[in-house]
Amino acid sequence: MKIDWDRRTCARRGHITYLPHEEHLRDKLRADTALGEAWRCLRCGDFALGAPHGSGPAADAPLVARGKVLRDLFVLRFLAVERAVRGVFIVLAALGVWQFSNRKDAVRRFFDEYLAVLRPVARHFHYDLDHSPVVGTIQKTFGYRHSTLLLVAALLLVYALVEIIEGVGLWRAKRWAEYLTVVATAAFLPLEIYELTEKVSWLKIATLVVNILAVLYIALTKRLFGLRGGRAAFDEERHSASLLEVETSAGVPATAHNG
């Protein structure tokens, strides 16, 4: 089923109406009803009762996100939530590393005690805990210096901060956030590819594919780094939409303002 992004958004946020100074547009955007005047919504095209939300030349009409733009905004906000959630988990991981650095000896004693208890049980199931990669990795962390663990915690916090800033910026559809997301995500792609050469897993493959698609999607649709005409083409597209939205809503051919 095709999603009507325009009406879906208007149902949640309300209509956006505008009174253009141009008489031929104003007459077509306005309607008289038994309940009073109504104005055509610039987003969905339906008439809404009440005075218009703004007025001025048609070229100065508000930039209303509609159609494909609304769909792109939905995708950006999905990525924003994913980045914010990831940032929160990284913060928790950083706090865990910091707590571990301060209680390393106690954690080691706790781990050794339970390892001794679990060893006979694992042996019963023909599993050698002493040669387990997981156990070996945990034991290796006990040898890290306190300063090294604090550095790891600090780096994790910085990474988490970047992720959360990305999430907030993408949610608000900020262009700087789109650049930050593309650069930060692309910077980690070589590491993700290297990890796949070490050990392949469906989670790693899915993460790599999602990140590659996110980089390409944002860079191309938002015309970043000069792609598809760059910022000039992006601004021109949005600016021209201001007049075109009013004319389209009023039923005027899109080329009328060029004559």
Image: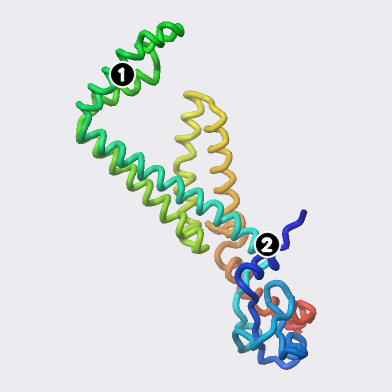
Q: Position of residue 193 (x, y in %)?
A: 50, 33
On the image, which quarter does residue 122 sit in? top left
Q: How is the image coloured?
A: rainbow
Badge 1 crowding class, 10 Å Cα cut-off, few under 14, some 14 to 19, many 20 or more, is few
Question: Is residue 160 toward the left or the right of residue 32 in the image?
Answer: left
Instruction: State the residue position of label 1.
Output: 114
Out of 230 and 123, give the one closest to the viewer: 123
**What amino acid does circle 1 point to?**
Tyr
Q: Which mark is residue 175?
A: none
Secondary structure under tag 2 reads helix
Quick check: 152 above or below 159? above
Out of 126 and 152, give the one closest to the viewer: 126
Q: Position of residue 38 (x, y in %)?
A: 72, 86
Instruction: State the residue position of label 2.
Output: 68
**Which quarter of the rendering shows the C terminus?**
bottom right
**What amino acid does circle 2 point to?**
Lys
Q: Nearer the viewer, mark 2 or mark 1?
A: 1
Question: Is residue 167 toward the left or the right of residue 66 in the image?
Answer: left
Identity of the residue drawn at 57% across and 36% down: 206
Secondary structure under tag 1 reads helix
